[in-house]
Amino acid sequence: MDLVERLLDGDRRALARAITLTENEDPAAAEIAAAVYPHTGQGRVIGVTGPPGAGKSTIVDGLTHLYRQAGLRVAVVAVDPTSPFTGGAILGDRIRMRRSAADAGVFIRSLATRGQLGGLSWHTGSVIRLLDAAGFPVIVVETVGAGQAEVEIMRHAETTVVVMIPGLGDEVQAIKAGILEIADVLAVNKADREGADALVKELQMMLQLGRPRVRPAEASSGEASPGVALPGVAWLPPVLKTVATSDQGLGDLVAAVDSHYRFLEESGGLAIRRRRELDAEIRGIIRDVAGQAACAWAETAGSWAEAFTRVIARRVDPRSAASELVSEFLGPRT
Amino acid sequence: MTQGKVRVLVAKPGLDSHDRGAKVVARAYRDAGMEVIYTGLHQTPEEVVEAAIQEDVDVIALSILSGAHLTLVPMVAGLLRERGIDDVLLLVGGIIPAEDRPNLKQAGAAEVFGPGSNLDEIVDFTRRNLRRGA
C-alpha cells in the first residue's frame, strides 16, 4: 500500500495522513493498521498527564530536547479535550513546545478527544503504532488527566509521569487518589513556588502508605528507596521537583523515566504491561464496535421504538429494555 | 463511524506580536465544531508549513498585522507548492491594504479578511471552500 510504504520510508505527510485516516475511522484505516503492525515494537511510550496548568507541555518540550540531545528522534501526541457543546477543540500544546516544533527530529501531532462515545481512546493504540512503525524510538503522549478517556489513554504508556503543581488546594485531593494509581514518576513542577516542598512530602507519604513494604528477607535496608528497584519489590514512584520553564530538574526526570523503563524490562513487567494493554485494547474495541452494531440493529431491524415507548410509559425499566434488545440482537447465540 | 473534523492551523508568521485577532478567530472555528491548532507567535514560514504537514490540516489561516504580508504569504504558499501540498485552503487575515489583496490571491491565498471581518462569514467561507471532502 503506497501510503504505508511512504510512511515506513519516513515521509511525514504520509504519516500525518495515516493518523488522520485512523482518527476518522476511514475504511482505509484497517488496512493501514494491518500493514504497519509487523513494523512496530521498537518504540517506547512515555505518558505525561496532570491537571490543567501544571506545565505538562513545557515539561514534554524539555524531555524531548534531552532525548534529542541523546540522539533519539521523538514523536509527541498532545491530546486536548473536545468541547462537548460545539464538537470543536482548541489544540494549543504546540505553543509551549517551540523548541521541539522547530526541530526536524521531532514530530508533533495534536489530537482532540472527540467526545465520550469511543473518541480518541479507541484510536490511541493505533496512532501510537503508526509513530512506532515510522521509526520514532521515543513516543510521548500528553493528556490532561481530567476524565476517564484521558486515563484510558495513559494505559498505553509504559512509563507515566504525573505532573503536579503546588498551591492547587483541596480540590487536588481527589486527583491525588487517582494519580497514585497510574503514576510511575511524579514531578512537582513550578517548584520555585511556595508549598512545593510540602507537596513533595505529602505525595511521598501517600505513595509510601499505598505501597507494600519490602519484607526484610528481600532487601538489606527493609524499605524501598524511591526510584530504585529491589528484587521482589514493586516500583516506588520517585517524587521530583522541576521548574520546566528554566529546564531545572529535567535531567533527573529523564533519568527517573529511563530507570523505570529499565526496571520494567529487567523485572519482566514490560511484557506483562504490554499483554495487559493489548488485551484491554482489543476488548475495548470489541465492546465499542459490537455495541455500536447492536444499537444500530436495534434501531433499524429490532424493537427499539417499541421498547423505548414502554420505558417512557414506565412499563419496563431501561436496563431490562436494553437487555431485551441485546438478546434480540444476539438471537439464537444467547 | 466517526466523522472527520475540519482541522485549521491558525498561524502567526513573522515578528508581529498581536494575537488577539488570531485567538478570536480560533475560538470562532472551535465554536463551529472545528479543531484548531494555534501555533503561537513568531513562526517562520518553514515552521508554519511543517506544522501544517504534521497536523494534516485542511486550512492554514495566517494572521499578519505587521505589514509583512507581501513577503510572508508568498513564502508560505511557495513552500506549500514545493512540498507538493495542493489540498490545503490558505487564508490570510489581519491588516492588509485593499491594493495588496490581488497580489496575495495571486500568490495563493484563497481569501483575505481584514480587521472587523464577520466571524460567521470567515467560518462560512472556510467550510464552502475546503479542498478535501471534509
Image (cartoon, rainbow, N blue to C red):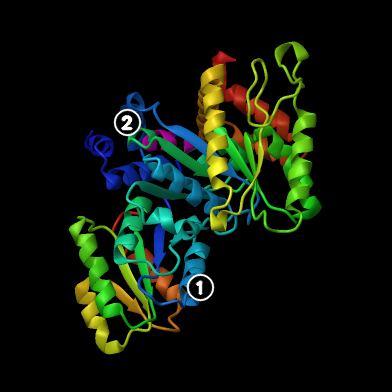
Query: What residue is shown at x 74% (from left), y 42% (from top)?
Result: A176
Amino acid on which the number 1 mark rests in the picture: Val
Question: In the rendered structure, which amino acid carries the disc numbered 2?
Answer: Glu
Query: Could you tell whether A237 is left or right of A268 in the image?
Result: right
Specify whether residue A156 is in view.
no
Residue A191 position, x and y percent, is 67, 53
**Residue annotated with mark 2:** A31
Residue A307 % position (x, y): 66, 34
Quarter where residue A48 is shown: top right
Give the dominant element type of the magenta stretch: helix, strand or loop: helix
Question: Quarter holding the N terminus of chain A?
Answer: top left
Residue depicted at x 55% and y 57%? A246
Residue B24: numbered disc = 1
What stretch of residues is rendered in magenta? Answer: A124-131
* Chain letter of the residue carrying label 2: A
Q: Residue at x 33, y 30 (%)?
A: A36
Helix, strand or loop under label 2: helix
Quadrant of the rendering where the C terminus of chain A is positioned:
top right
> In the image shown, does A290 or A58 lie closer to the viewer?
A58
| The quarter of the displayed image where residue A86 is located | bottom right
Pick the residue in front: A84 or A207.
Answer: A207
Give the crowd class for mark 1: few <14, some 14-19, many >=20 residues within 10 Å: few
